[in-house]
Amino acid sequence: VDFVESGGGSVQPGGSLRLTCEASGSIFGKNHMGWYRPGVGDRRELVATATDTGVRNYADSVKGRFTISRDNAKSSVYLQMNNLKPEDTARYYCSLVGPNPSFPTYRYWGQGVQVTVSS
């Protein structure tokens, strides 16, 4: 699976960006698609994901500011980021994992897009 990611950039604190990730081909079966960013050590931490049935999950740090949406027909996921803070600065990676992140049988990563929040 390949991804086309877009929407990164530089904004001032309080600004907004919208990330887009489109996966090549159709996606079948239970899966989670969403966005991650670097966390502690070598791990990538969840920012937001949406399942194929529309269940959404957010990191506590972005709740109320970020909104994830998904278009299964387009194999795409979108992340609307509002009220951005300097601590949101990171490279954001699109991910597709199935059937779920706790017990994955497959996981794919995009190349990532850079988001920079500074005044």
Image: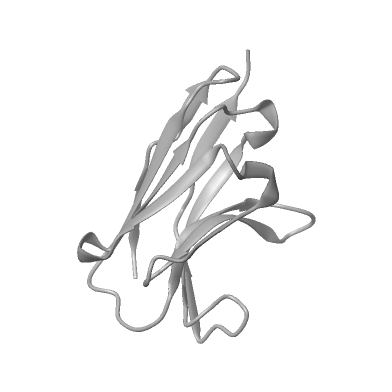
Q: Quadrant of the C terminus?
A: top right
Residue at figure coordinates x 53%, y 34% from the top left: 115
| Along the viewing direction, whichever of 112 and 30 lies nearer the viewer | 30
Residue at figure coordinates x 61%, y 39% from the top left: 90
| Along the viewing direction, whichever of 19 and 72 lies nearer the viewer | 72
- Tell me where residue 118 appears, x and y as whole percent: 63, 19
- Tell me where residue 84 appears, x and y as whole percent: 58, 28
Taking the image as shown, residue 60 lies to the left or right of residue 16, namely right
| Along the viewing direction, whichever of 63 and 47 lies nearer the viewer | 63
Residue at figure coordinates x 73%, y 59% from the top left: 42
Q: How is the image coloured?
A: one colour
- Tell me where residue 102 appears, x and y as whole percent: 62, 80
- Tell me where residue 86 appears, x and y as whole percent: 67, 27
Judge whether residue 16 can be spotted in this image: yes
Residue furthest to the right in view is: 41
Residue furthest to the top in view is: 119
Q: Quadrant of residue 3?
A: bottom left
Judge whether residue 95 can be spotted in this image: no
Residue at figure coordinates x 37%, y 72% from the top left: 53
Q: Is residue 53 above or below residue 7?
A: below
Looking at the image, how many numbered discs can be counted on the residues? 0
Taking the image as shown, residue 41 lies to the left or right of residue 31, namely right
Q: Quadrant of the N terminus?
A: bottom left
Q: Is residue 109 above or below residue 4?
A: below
Taking the image as shown, residue 96 lies to the left or right of residue 38, namely left
